[in-house]
């Protein structure tokens, strides 16, 4: 968890944008001792796959790597793509994976971007453990991004705007049971994914999409009354309206940096083991 630092952009809307500054150290082929464990953090997105290795303080030791998400993407294709993605990265001791869907006990329950029927019940953590030979923790991608954004005080909500929409809720730094709001109706017959996702942005344009984002933020605020809301994901860069004081834009790199907290935090979320 990081303390928020806020700044205003010079063009467009005034926002509260937080950008992490990764710290690098020389590569090493030797694994650290348990108390200096390195974490391989993987951020699975509907458009791209990203990964980096974090040191014992949660800082990147190398720049992240990225590859396009393959389609169609059944489990075997995803596993193969992730193994290839992380091949150039340095040694690591454990793995965190943020996945765009509902996960529980390291198994995928929903995968709206890749096909629910193909993915339902798939043990992605076990499959990656078999490939990497390291322990793996699997959690929702918005939950993982939220871990890096929150400051651990009060009720905090992370919202990701990308191919679809993700949310993660935290109370005093503790991850709450995941709510897959992306599949909940928000306007007529449209759910959050259909209303605010990448396809909607392309279809209706940035101006109307921004109006929808404002409407959804008000709905979420009225529903949860969070002390802070953090907005990330690739499409957050398209926000042009002035954000309320308790709403902050966060860097996409938080989707990776949160992988460290998935191991460090003791919390009762359904998708991360204690």
Image (tube, rainbow, N blue to C red):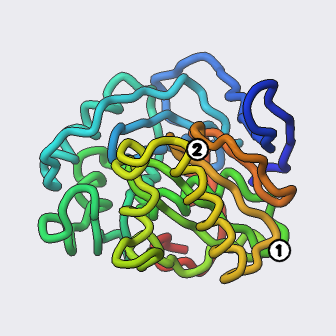
The one of 263 and 158 positioned closer to us in this rendering? 158
- Left or right: residue 106 versus residue 76 is right
Q: How many marks?
A: 2
- Left or right: residue 13 versus residue 240 is right
Determine which quarter of the picture holds residue 83.
top left
The vertical placement of 42 against 142, above or below, is: above
The residue identified by callout 2 is: 236
- Give the image location of residue 108, x and y in percent: 29, 69
Q: Quadrant of the C terminus?
A: bottom right
Mark 1 or 2, closer to the camera: 2
Query: How packed is label 1: few (under 14 Cα within 10 Å), some, or many (20 or more)?
Result: some
Residues tagged 1 and 2 counted as in contact (Cβ below 8 A): no
- Give the image location of residue 64, x and y in percent: 49, 28
The residue identified by callout 1 is: 154
- Left or right: residue 210 versus residue 108 is right
The one of 56 and 265 positioned closer to us in this rendering? 265
Query: How packed is label 2: few (under 14 Cα within 10 Å), some, or many (20 or more)?
Result: some
**In the image, which disc is placed on residue 187?**
none
Q: Earlier in the sequence, mark 1 or mark 2?
A: 1
């Amino acid at each position: 968890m990081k303390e928020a630092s806020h700044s205003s952009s010079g063009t467009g809307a005034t926002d509260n944008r937080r950008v992490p500054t990764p710290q690098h150290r020389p590569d090493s082929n030797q694994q650290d001792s348990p108390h200096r464990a390195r974490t391989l953090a993987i951020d699975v997105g509907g458009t791209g796959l990203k990964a980096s290795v974090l040191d014992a303080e949660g800082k990147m030791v190398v720049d992240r790597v990225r590859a396009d998400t393959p389609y169609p993407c059944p489990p075997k294709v995803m596993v193969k793509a992730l193994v290839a993605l992380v091949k150039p990265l340095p040694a690591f001791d454990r793995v965190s994976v943020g996945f765009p869907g509902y996960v529980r006990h390291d198994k995928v329950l929903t995968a709206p971007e890749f096909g629910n029927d193909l993915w339902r019940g798939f043990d992605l953590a076990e499959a990656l453990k078999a490939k990497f030979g390291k322990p793996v923790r699997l959690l929702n991608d918005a939950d993982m991004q939220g871990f890096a954004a929150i400051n651990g005080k009060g009720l905090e909500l992370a919202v990701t705007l990308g191919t679809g929409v993700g949310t993660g809720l935290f109370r005093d730094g503790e991850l709450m049971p995941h709510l897959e709001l992306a599949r909940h109706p928000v306007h007529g017959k449209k759910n959050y994914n259909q209303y605010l996702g990448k396809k909607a942005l392309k279809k209706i344009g940035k101006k109307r999409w921004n109006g929808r984002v404002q409407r959804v933020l008000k709905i979420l605020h009225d529903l949860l009354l969070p002390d802070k809301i953090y907005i990330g994901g690739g499409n957050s860069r398209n926000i042009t309206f002035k954000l309320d004081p308790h709403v902050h834009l966060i860097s996409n790199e938080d989707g990776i940096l949160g992988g460290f907290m998935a191991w460090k935090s003791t919390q009762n979320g359904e998708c991360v083991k204690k």
